[in-house]
Image: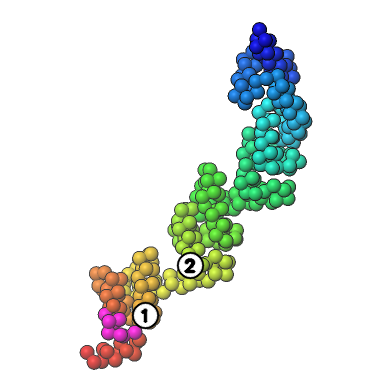
């Protein structure tokens, strides 16, 4: 009998708890669900229920402020109390800071606010000023991503995916917004019309230490000069096609052999009319290298003696 009276008191207090939260017009299933939640949390005595209700009453005012800050007319719920307890306890946010953050996201709801605060916590943003700056920069990065997509000529269905996988990574490398837009234009002109291909270029530039705006300009100028010179080489050996990456690799190899542009053009002239002119250039230069012929004077002297 004593146990029955105790359980009865617990149940009565649970019912009163539900009525205090939602008024008298509540379903029995709701009361049963609250009872299950209490049992799961270990709230199984009148004293513990009283404490939980007391905690809720103390926090419901703060929860109401958060809901109003978000423009919500929803009444505080027990789950909201648990969220607020975690935000101020485990995550160490000030209630005023949480309210400020909530005011920046109208109609987002408590669960969405929870996601936002988790992100801020992960990025170590706890004060109003740094939260404002972080969220403003996040908006800027999203807009930057949209602008890069336009320059590349691509459509981003889920913009956050490109922000996380590409643009945020590029910014972490040290590239600024203006440089990324210029590089996107460069990629478009070079038929690298995707975030993936631009990512390949940026990782290559990063490995070369080409990060600052000045170094990027120098790189682009050098690339333009290389493109022009390779076009001359292809024309000299009778090819009319566009310069491709293989040509660039060949030129890099020829330069590593210490051949000047003049010597490379001389080899290209000898390759004119051959079935495979570019490999033939490589063969000619390899022959000259083995004979230690690296200048036009040495080549002319060798030709006079043969």
Between residue 240 and residue 74, name the one nearer to us. 74
Query: Can residue 242 be spotted in the picture?
Result: no
Q: Residue at horizontal 64%, vertical 37%?
A: 114
Q: Nearer the viewer, residue 139 or 229?
A: 139
> Quadrant of the rendered structure where residue 14 is?
top right
Image quadrant occupied by the N terminus: top right
Residue 303: percent from left, percent from top: 26, 89
Direction front: furthest residue: 2
Provide the residue designation for mark 2. Answer: 208
Highlighted range, magenta: 287-294
Q: In what element is the residue under mark 2?
A: helix
Colouring scheme, one of rainbow, by chain, secondary structure, one colour: rainbow
Kindly check if marks 1 and 2 are in contact, taking CB atoms under 8 A apart as contact.
no
Dot 1: element: loop
Look at the picture and state if 71 lies above or below 162: above
Q: Which mark is residue 222?
A: none
- Image location of residue 12, percent across then percent down: 70, 13
Which residue in the protein does label 1 denote? 259
| Quadrant position of residue 249 | bottom left
Q: Is residue 207 left or right of residue 285?
A: right
Q: Nearer the viewer, residue 178 or 85?
A: 85
Q: Residues within 10 Å of mark 2 (few under 14, many from 20)?
A: few
The answer to whether 105 is drawn above or below residue 36 in the figure is below
Query: Of residues 109 and 268, which is closer to you in this image?
Result: 109
């Amino acid at each position: 009998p004593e146990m029955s009276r105790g359980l009865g008191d617990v149940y009565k207090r649970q019912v009163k708890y539900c009525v205090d939260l939602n008024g008298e017009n509540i379903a029995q299933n709701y009361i049963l669900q609250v009872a299950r939640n209490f049992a799961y949390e270990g709230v199984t005595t009148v004293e513990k229920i009283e404490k939980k209700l007391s905690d809720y009453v103390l926090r419901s005012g703060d929860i109401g402020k958060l809901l109003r800050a978000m423009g919500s007319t929803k009444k505080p719920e027990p789950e909201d109390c648990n969220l607020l307890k975690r935000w101020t306890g485990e995550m160490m946010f000030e209630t005023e800071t949480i309210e400020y953050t909530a005011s920046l996201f109208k109609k987002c709801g408590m669960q969405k606010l929870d996601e936002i605060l988790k992100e801020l916590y992960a990025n170590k943003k706890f004060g109003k000023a740094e939260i404002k700056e972080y969220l403003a920069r996040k908006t800027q990065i999203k807009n930057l991503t949209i602008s890069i997509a336009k320059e590349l000529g691509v459509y981003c269905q889920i913009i956050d995916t490109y922000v996380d996988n590409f643009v945020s990574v590029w910014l972490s490398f040290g590239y600024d917004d203006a440089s990324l837009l210029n590089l996107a234009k460069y990629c478009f002109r070079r038929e690298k019309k995707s975030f993936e291909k631009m990512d390949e270029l940026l990782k290559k530039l990063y490995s070369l230490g080409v990060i600052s705006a000045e170094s990027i300009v120098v790189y682009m100028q050098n690339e333009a000069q290389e493109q022009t010179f390779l076009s001359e080489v292809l024309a000299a050996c009778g090819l009319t096609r566009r310069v491709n990456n293989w040509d660039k690799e060949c030129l890099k190899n020829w330069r590593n052999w210490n051949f000047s542009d003049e010597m490379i053009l001389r080899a290209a002239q000898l390759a004119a009319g051959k079935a495979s002119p570019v490999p033939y250039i490589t063969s000619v230069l390899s022959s000259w290298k083995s004979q230690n012929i690296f200048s036009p004077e040495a080549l002319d002297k060798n030709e006079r003696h043969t």
